[in-house]
Image (cartoon, grey):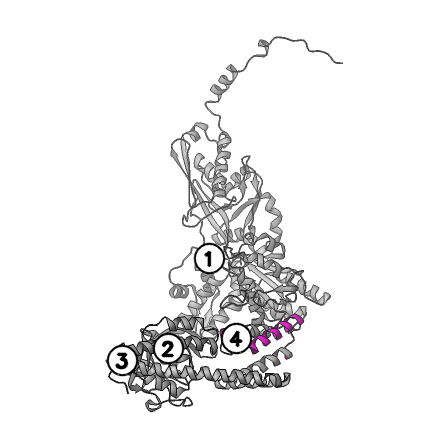
């Protein structure tokens, strides 16, 4: 019972933690390990409010589900400072006790423990006797900490800095070797002087006991042999672990030892694992350092050091798999089959690292997965998009809290074999910053001469990556760092034609979406015209992702109608149904203008998602020969426009343009879709054609598109991305495409399906392009100021006769 020296306060309703084998005193900060579900719930409740909680000891530590009668009546009220969730579901919490609390009513439920508690505050008077007793206790504490407790300088300072007698007793009490019942009795004593007397007496007893133990140890120390000493120490450790409830540590150590012996580790890895296991034996099982060692052993034992899958070099099966899962891509499939044929001939897979470059949605990732399936290798994908820390590749050193291996080792563990097919996705999206350059870390990974000794910073043990088959993907080949690109064989995947998209939809996308949306082949049927309508007027992409989403949307609409029983008959997807399900078409099938116009020319551009038709517009205004460029043009494109204008001005008379007219005219060049950044030199011939059309008033053919860089002499230089640009022209309804003459050789690698509806004309000079693009060629004119200029030039020339004659010596 609390005496009158305590003043009770109002009742508080707080979450409650019943504790086993521990009594918490005010001003004490203690860690708890909480495992019971109601206790965890009470802890969560406290964290959700102001972190206040009531801690009280159980009378019997063995009671698993305590009732109100199983709890002592006095505990402590305090706050949760921090928590740490352990891997076995246990929570480690740091509790700071503040005041004594008297348990009024305990609410024991299956959800969580709570209690009505009355906070009590001490009242006492400082007497000379109490002051003298406090002084004696402090002096005895110094001797106690020196002789009995070791390495407690911080505790001594905390205890001796406290001036209040009742707080001094509470600070020293946890240090004493007393049982649960004794400590609880001390907690319930409300007289500070009486508490100090008990503590003083207990310290004197322990000091005397320590002296006796020291004498006994000195007397028998010489009689204990090495074997007996080891036995004695082991028995002491067992006894200590039993008292602390840590008897499961031995079983854990044995389990790790068995794994080390059974796992086919490398020699270096086995030595390191055994060394770490010895460290773990000497640690407390619940210490933070032990958790770090456990995590390290789990990683090093979880890796597939010598576990390999057997490669199957069956070319017929590989070809069957690739054809079944991918339509088209004949050149890519042929390269994959060649790769497997060489591997079969050599007997092992040590070929070049393949990098698949192409726009999104063309099947780069699925192609790598198909190769893994054909080889019967495990497949693992590692995304590199946005990775900017070198430690993401090589891992963090174990000195950091929460350190883990890098993505390479994590992927190997996920693959469960040491020779998987690892796909490094989006390798062109790597970035670098203050944390290092991840692309530099990949240099070792992708080098066959070095990756057999790859070392992760976390493991600090060499791991052989030479058996891993690496595939990389990228959208833009120019963004891949040059040293990385040098280690790879780049294979380019272009966009699909409309016919290829139709085949892909019929063979793969439609069956997949019908299944995913709970339909069957009898409930929905896609007509050819309906599918063509989706491809032409609802998607505009190089790949097929938007097409798959559109097909999925149609299937969802059909599923809804079937569920709502609006129809019982199979639905046939026609163009009208497509409009009904997908709404207003997003694109026109033909993007070209309806008629020929002056100053507007169709250009072709390459983007990360495929080719695109870009219109170039030129507007002339009376002025002082100023040039204005709009449409978010990049520096290279601006220079290309200036070069085109210089070419037109220097050849104005040839194209029927008066020089005086050019001199008195401002030129505005605009490329529509101003919100989209544009750059590159390939619009030079397009801009020159628009300029000449605007100055002469001759319309440009609306079914003609062109691409090529222009020089100041009018030469048309080669460009890249020809296939993507031809695909864009075909989608937009272009009939004639003008390309640089030096790109004519690239036409042999472009499929007949793309070229058959296009008239492709190679041009060497700008004039060749004008003959095709303009409705008619302009007639050259004479400059009206020409005669005047020639007269001025003649007047300024000094006649030969005005020079004095001189004799020229003859050297013959």
The reply to whether discs 1 and 4 touch (Cβ–Cβ < 8 Å) is: no
| Disc 1: which residue | 540
Q: CA distance from mark 1 to mark 2?
A: 89 Å
| Disc 2: which residue | 136
Decide which of tag 1 and tag 4 comes sooner along the chain: 4
Callout 1 crowding tier (Cα within 10 Å): few <14, some 14–19, many ≥20 = many
Give x and y (percent) for residue 684: 51, 41
Q: Quadrant of residue 306?
A: bottom right
Q: CA distance from mark 2 to mark 4?
A: 41 Å
Callout 2 crowding tier (Cα within 10 Å): few <14, some 14–19, many ≥20 = some
| Main SS class of the magenta portion in the image | helix
| Residue 327 lies in the magenta stretch | no
| Disc 3: which residue | 120
Quarter of the picture holding the N terminus:
bottom left
| Disc 4: which residue | 290
Q: Nearer the viewer, mark 2 or mark 4?
A: 2
């Amino acid at each position: 019972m609390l005496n009158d020296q305590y003043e009770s306060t109002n009742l508080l309703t707080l979450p409650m933690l019943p504790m086993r084998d521990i009594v918490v005193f005010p001003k004490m900060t203690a860690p708890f390990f909480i495992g019971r579900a109601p206790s965890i719930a009470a802890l969560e409740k406290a964290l959700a409010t102001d972190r206040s909680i009531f801690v009280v000891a159980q009378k019997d530590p063995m009671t698993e589900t305590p009732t109100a009668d199983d709890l002592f009546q006095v505990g402590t009220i305090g706050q949760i400072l921090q928590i740490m969730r352990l891997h076995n579901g246990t929570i480690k919490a740091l509790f700071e006790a503040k005041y004594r609390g008297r348990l009024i009513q305990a609410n024991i439920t299956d959800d969580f423990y709570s209690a009505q508690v009355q906070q009590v505050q001490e009242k006492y008077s400082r007497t000379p006797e109490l002051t003298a007793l406090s002084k004696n206790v402090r002096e005895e504490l110094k001797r106690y900490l020196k002789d009995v407790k070791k390495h407690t300088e911080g505790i001594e300072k905390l205890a001796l800095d406290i001036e209040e007698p009742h707080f001094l007793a509470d600070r020293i009490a946890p240090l004493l070797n007393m049982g649960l019942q004794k400590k609880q009795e001390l907690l319930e004593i409300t007289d500070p002087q009486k508490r100090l007397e008990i503590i003083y007496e207990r310290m004197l007893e322990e000091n005397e006991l320590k002296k006796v133990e020291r004498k006994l140890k000195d007397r028998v120390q010489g009689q204990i042999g090495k074997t007996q000493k080891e036995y004695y120490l082991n028995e002491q450790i067992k006894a200590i672990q039993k008292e602390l409830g840590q008897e499961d540590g031995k079983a854990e150590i044995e389990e790790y030892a068995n794994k080390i012996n059974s796992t086919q580790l490398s020699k270096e890895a086995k030595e390191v694992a055994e060394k770490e296991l010895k460290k773990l034996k000497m640690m407390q099982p619940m210490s933070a350092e032990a958790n770090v060692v456990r995590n390290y052993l789990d990683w090093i034992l979880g890796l597939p050091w010598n576990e390999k899958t057997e490669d199957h070099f069956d070319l017929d099966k590989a070809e069957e798999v690739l054809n079944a899962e991918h339509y088209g891509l004949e050149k890519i499939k042929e390269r994959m089959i060649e790769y497997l044929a060489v591997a079969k001939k050599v007997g092992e897979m040590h070929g070049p690292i393949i990098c698949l470059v192409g726009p999104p949605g063309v099947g780069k990732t699925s192609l790598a997965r198909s190769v893994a399936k054909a080889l019967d290798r495990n497949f693992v994908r590692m995304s590199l998009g946005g990775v900017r820390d070198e430690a993401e590749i090589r891992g963090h050193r174990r000195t950091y809290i929460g350190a883990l291996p890098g993505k390479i080792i994590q992927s190997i563990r996920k693959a469960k074999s040491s020779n998987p097919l690892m796909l490094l996705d989006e390798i062109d999206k790597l970035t670098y910053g203050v944390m290092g350059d991840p692309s530099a870390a990949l240099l070792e990974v992708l080098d066959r001469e070095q990756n057999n000794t790859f070392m992760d910073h976390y493991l600090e043990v060499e791991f052989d990556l030479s058996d891993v088959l690496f595939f990389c993907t990228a959208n833009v080949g120019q963004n891949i760092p040059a040293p990385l690109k040098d280690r790879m064989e780049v294979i380019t995947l272009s966009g699909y034609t409309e016919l290829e998209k139709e085949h892909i939809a019929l063979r793969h996308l439609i069956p997949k979406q019908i299944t995913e949306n709970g339909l069957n082949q009898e409930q929905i049927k896609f007509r050819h015209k309906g599918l063509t309508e989706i491809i032409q007027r609802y998607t505009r992409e190089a790949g097929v992702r938007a097409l798959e989403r559109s097909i999925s949307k149609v299937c969802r609409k059909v599923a809804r109608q079937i569920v709502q029983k609006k129809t019982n008959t199979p639905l046939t997807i026609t163009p009208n149904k497509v409009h009904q399900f997908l709404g207003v078409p997003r694109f026109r099938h033909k993007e070209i203008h309806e008629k020929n116009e002056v100053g507007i020319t169709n250009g072709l551009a390459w983007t990360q998602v495929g080719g695109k038709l870009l219109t170039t517009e030129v507007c002339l205004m009376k002025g002082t020969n100023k040039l204005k460029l709009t449409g978010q043009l990049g520096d290279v494109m601006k220079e290309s426009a200036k070069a085109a204008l210089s070419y037109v001005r220097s050849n104005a008379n040839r194209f029927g343009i008066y020089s005086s007219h050019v001199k008195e005219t401002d030129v505005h060049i605009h490329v529509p879709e101003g919100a989209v950044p544009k750059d590159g030199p390939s619009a030079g011939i397009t801009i020159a054609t628009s300029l000449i059309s605007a100055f002469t008033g001759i319309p440009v053919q609306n079914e003609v598109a062109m691409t090529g860089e222009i020089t100041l002499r009018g030469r048309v230089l080669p460009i890249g991305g020809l296939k993507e640009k031809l695909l864009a022209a075909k989608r937009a309804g272009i009939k004639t495409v003008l390309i640089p003459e030096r790109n004519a050789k690239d036409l042999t690698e472009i499929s007949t399906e793309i070229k058959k509806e296009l008239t492709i004309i190679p041009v060497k000079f700008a004039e060749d392009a004008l003959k095709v693009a303009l409705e008619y060629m302009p007639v050259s004119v004479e400059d009206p100021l020409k005669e005047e200029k020639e007269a001025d030039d003649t007047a300024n020339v000094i006649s030969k006769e005005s020079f004095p004659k001189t004799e020229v010596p003859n050297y013959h």
